[in-house]
Image (tube, rainbow, N blue to C red):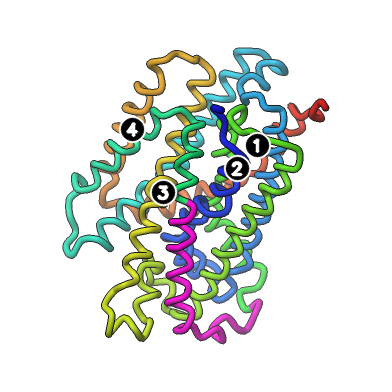
Amino acid sequence: MNKISTRQLYFLLACIMPAGKLLLLPTRLAEAAGNDLLFPAAACYLLEAGAVFCVLLLAERNTSLYDLLRERVGKVAAGILLALLSLFLLFAALLPLMEQRLFVQSIFYDTLPSLAAFAPFFLFAAYLCAKPLFSLGRMWDLLAPVAIAGLLGILVLSVGSAKFGALLPVGAGGGRGFLKGSAAAACWFFDAPLLLPMLGHIDAKKGTAWRGALFYLAGGGAILFYLAVFYAIYAETAVNQLFAFANTSKYFAGITVLGRIDYLFIFALALVMAFYAALPLQASVGCWTQTFRAKPLPVLLSVLFSALFFALLSLLDLRFGDVMDCISGTLFWIFPAMSAGLPLLLLLLLWRPRRA
């Protein structure tokens, strides 16, 4: 069956997507909200879970997004809307790819290498994007236990070093800190739009929508616990801890005897993150292939998008701080508009009760 099963979908929502929140989101939240970082993160997760619910209700129609739109607004308008969604996904892909590059270069190399050291990732991304969407489900079957083992291992090694009193007093940042933190975190929450090109490829059943939202929240709960551990270890210095998930576990007492055994878990999560970082490109290709359905198109677009982002990362090699400030500061509003507003709008426009 050329469909993504509900089991594979739940693996994506609960295990794969949380991995994309571990790199710089904790530091950005600590900078914006201080010890109240859990509250804006929880708000973003609740909003995105509602958007995931809306998308999965549409998935119960078992029809692609393009076909759903074509029935309601016509071919031209459907093509335009899919093109806009593709452009948003390409825009959303920039920050995860820059994060991934900096993480690999900072953690796995003793000296900072050139961008060429990260070039093989784009070959991997081009291959992955050329694969049909339904084939991703088999990858998630394999990646889910790797993600669970990686995050669980890091949490177990880290929690003993946490001083949870650092999270007190609750509400110290006030409403301003909450709003600032929510805005700063928004650019990491575009998971619902990633699901839209998968419509028609998901073997959705009755109840998939609310179960999917619960699995997404379960993954969010794990990230919230990690955020609490992260701030409880670093407290006021958390704002300076880039890629902290690769460092919180090194304070475990047994590390001095056993060596950096935590790298097993760090490598496991890095593998999952590589697949997640390529997912927006895959989804963007899916938007175009739904619209035109030409056999050579996925391969051509995969190569084009991978080459485009390699060129962009080369151009912005030393401008990551500026890019981060622009995306998570000036342009943060694009993400809730597209991640929460678009799925709700599409649900109101397209949803009909599933026929018995």
**Mark 3–mark 2 contact, CB under 8 Å?**
no
Report the amino acid beneath label 1. Leu
353 part of magenta stretch? no
Name the one closer to the observer, 79 or 161.
161
Which range is magenta? 144-171
Residue 126: assigned label:
4
Placement of 335 over or under 67, stated as above or below: below
Report the amino acid beneath label 3. Pro
The first of marks 2 and 1 along the sequence is: 2
> Can residue 334 be seen in this snapshot?
no
Report the amino acid beneath label 2. Ala
Separation (CA) of disc 2 from disc 1: 9 Å
Q: Secondary structure at mark 4?
A: helix
Residue 96: assigned label:
3
**Mark 3–mark 4 contact, CB under 8 Å?**
no
Quarter occupied by residue 203:
top right
The first of marks 4 and 2 along the sequence is: 4
Placement of 52 over or under 83, stated as above or below: below
Residue designated by label 1: 342
155 part of magenta stretch? yes
